Image: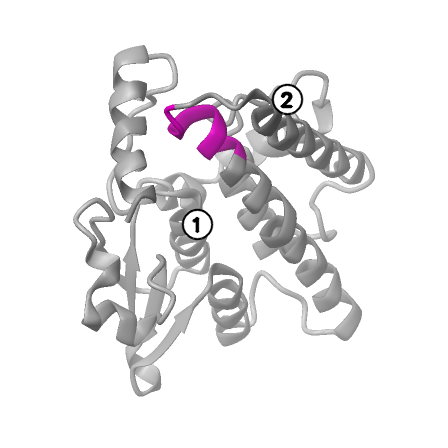
Amino acid sequence: MIDLYTAGTPNGWKASVTLEELELPYAVHAIDLGKGDQKTESFLAMNPNGRIPVIVDRDEEDFAVFETGAIMIYLAEKTHRLMPGDVKGRSKVIQWLMFQMGGIGPMMGQANVFFRYFPEKIQPAIDRYQHETRRLFEVLDRRLGESEWLADDFSIADIANWCWVRTYKWSGVSADGLDNLKRWRDAIRMRPACQRGIEVPVKLENIIDDEKAAKEFSKGVQNILQT
C-alpha cells in the first residue's frame, strides 16, 4: 500500500495520475497548504523541503519518496511499467521528464506567480515567463509531430508534462496553432486513469472563466507564497 500526501496542484497530480495509471492501491492524505500542513514536523520528516507530494511505501519498510520526478521513477521501476527497461528507452523517458521538471514546471510556475498571484503586475516578468513557456510548448509540439508520445510509448514523461500543460490558460499562455500538442493533450485527457488522477485529493471546478472565483483562489495562493 502506498500513502500519498498531496494537494490539488500539477505536481500533486503527477503522483496521483501515475498511481492511477499503474493501478497501485493507495491511500490519499490531503495536505492543506493554506493551513501549513506541509510545514509540520511530521511532514518534514517525510520531505525536508516541505513540499507536496510525498509517498510512503508501506510495503517497503515505510520508505518515503519526495520530489515528483523521483516519485514517478520509483513507481515506474517498482512496477516495471510506464518506463522501458533498456538503457536508451529509459533515457528517453527521463530526458522528457527532466524537460518538464527543469523547464515546463518552473516556467509555468513563475508565469502563474507573476500573472495570477502577485498583487503588483510586473509586465516584464510576466512577458518573460509566458514567452518562455510558449517556447517550451513549441518544443513539445515539434516532438509530438514526430511521435505519438514524447518517448515513443506512453510513459511517465507524458504524465508529467501533461499535468502542467493542461493548465496553460491559468498561466495566460496561448496554445494556438500547436496542433500536435492539442492532439496529445486530448488523447491523455481521454484516459480514464488520468481523469481520476486529476481529481485527487478533490475535484477542482474550472475557475478560469469565473473572475470572482479566480480572484479568491489567487488571494489564497498569495497567502501560501508568503509563508
Left/right placement of residue 60 relative to residue 186 reads: left
Q: Mark 2 points at which residue?
A: 175
What amino acid does circle 1 point to? Asn
Examine the rendered structure and indicate whether residue 100 appears above or below residue 94: above
Q: Residue reaching furthest bottom?
A: 61
Instruction: List x then y, in percent, for residue 104.
Output: 61, 43
**Residue 20 in the image: x percent, y percent?**
39, 54
Q: Position of 18 compared to 45: left or right?
A: right
Q: Magenta part mainly helix, strand or loop? A: helix
Asked whether the viewer can see residue 28, the reply is no
At a point 42% along the width and 25% down the height, the residue shown is 116
The answer, for residue 135, to whether it is visible in the render is yes
Structural distance between the alpha carbons of marks 1 and 2: 21 Å
Which region is colored magenta? 111-119
x, y (%) of residue 7?
29, 48
| Residue 131 is one of the magenta-drawn residues | no
**x 35%, y 71%: residue:** 48
In the displayed structure, does residue 32 sit left or right of residue 158?
Answer: left
Q: Which residue is drawn at 73% across and 32% down?
A: 135
- Give the residue pinned by disc 1: 11
Q: Does the magenta stretch include residue 115?
A: yes
Q: How crowded is mark 2: few (under 14 residues within 10 Å), some or many (20 or more)?
A: some
Quarter-of-image position of residue 105: top right
Q: Quadrant of residue 50?
A: bottom left
Q: Nearer the viewer, residue 98 or 150?
A: 98
